[in-house]
Image (spheres, grey):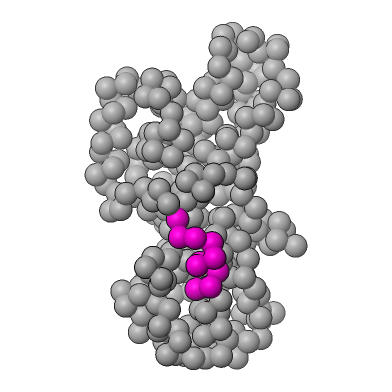
Amino acid sequence: MAATEWDGATFEAHRPLLFSIAYRMLGSASEAEDVVQDAWLRARQDEHADIRSPRAYLTTIVTRLCIDRLRSAERTRMEYPGPWLPEPLAQPNQESTELASSLTTAFLVVLEHLAPTERAVFLLREVFELDFDEIARSVGKTETNTRQILTRARGRLREPYPRFAVSRAESEEIVHRFRHACVTGNVEELMAVLHADATLVADGGGKAAAPAGPLLGAHRIAEFLIAMVGKVRWSESDPQVVSINGTPGLLVRHPISGDGTYSFDIADGRIRGIYVVRNPDKLRGFLERTH
C-alpha cells in the first residue's frame, strides 16, 4: 500500500488499537490522542513507504512516537511535585477481559518501573501478543535484543502481568462498602475492607491538596480518609461509583476542596491499593466524558 492509498476508513479501523497502545505507554488519554493524530499525519506524508501490513506500519509509528515522548518527559516526571499517577480514563475501548486487565491504574503504575523501550517491548509482547519480529521492527532493535529487553523488563517488575482481573460484581461490592464507610465515618467498616498493608497514593500535581508521599498501612489510610479528609466532606461530595480505566471507582466532587477520582487495586476480597487523582489538569478529560 502506497501513501497515496491511505484513506480515513483504513486508519480508523486501526485507531482503537493505536490508542490502546499509546495510552498504556503514556498514561495520558490526551497525549495518546495526540500521538494517534501524529501517526495519521506521518502515514499520509510518507511517500516512499511500502506498506504490506497497515497494522504493523502504524503500530511502529505510534510506538516510536511514544518512546520519544517518554524520553522527553523523564525529567518532567522526576521534577513532578509529589507522586505521579496516570490520567484516569472514563470510557475505554471495548476490550476483552484479559486485555482490559492491563488497563487498570495499578498496572499502569507498575509500568513506571520500566524504561521507555522496555515498556514498549513488554506491552507489545505481554499485552498485545505481537510476534518478536514485529516488535523488533517497532522499537528498532534486533530480535535477539528485543528478547533480552523483554527478559530485563520482566525482571524489573515486582509483579507479573495480571491475566485475570477481579470480577466486576466483586469490585463494585467492595467499592460500595468503601464508599459507605467513608461517608458514614465508620472506621471499623473501612478497616474491614482494607488490606493490613494497603497503600494510598495521591496525585495533586502541586495544584490540589494531596499527601506528599504514599500512605502505608490500613490504620494510617483510615486515619487520613476519616479524620483528615473528614466525614462531612465525604457526605457533602456525594461520591459516585463510576468506571475508571474499565473498573469500578469513585468520583468525588466538592465545591470547595475540589474533585478527585479514586481507583482501586483489589485482591483477596480487600483493597490493597488506592490511587487518588486530584490534579485538575488530569481530571479535565475524565470529567468531560463522564457527563
The magenta segment = 165-175
Whether residue 82 is visible here, answered yes or no, is no
**Residue 274 in which image quadrant:** bottom left
Residue shown at the point (63%, 66%) measured from the top left = 242
Is 55 included in the stretch rendered in magenta? no
Asked which quadrant contains residue 137, the reply is top left
Image point (64%, 9%), residue name: 2
Spot occupied by residue 249 in the image (x, y as percentages of width and height): 56, 67
Of the 4 image quadrants, the one containing the C terminus is bottom right
Image location of residue 194, percent across then percent down? 40, 77
Q: Nearer the viewer, residue 146 or 196?
A: 196
Q: Report the side of 133 relative to 281 (left or right).
A: left
Q: Is residue 78 above or below residue 275?
A: above
Q: In this rendered view, identify the residue nearer to me: 238 or 112.
A: 238
* Secondary structure mostly taken by the magenta-highlighted segment of the chain: helix
**Magenta-span inclusion, residue 170:** yes
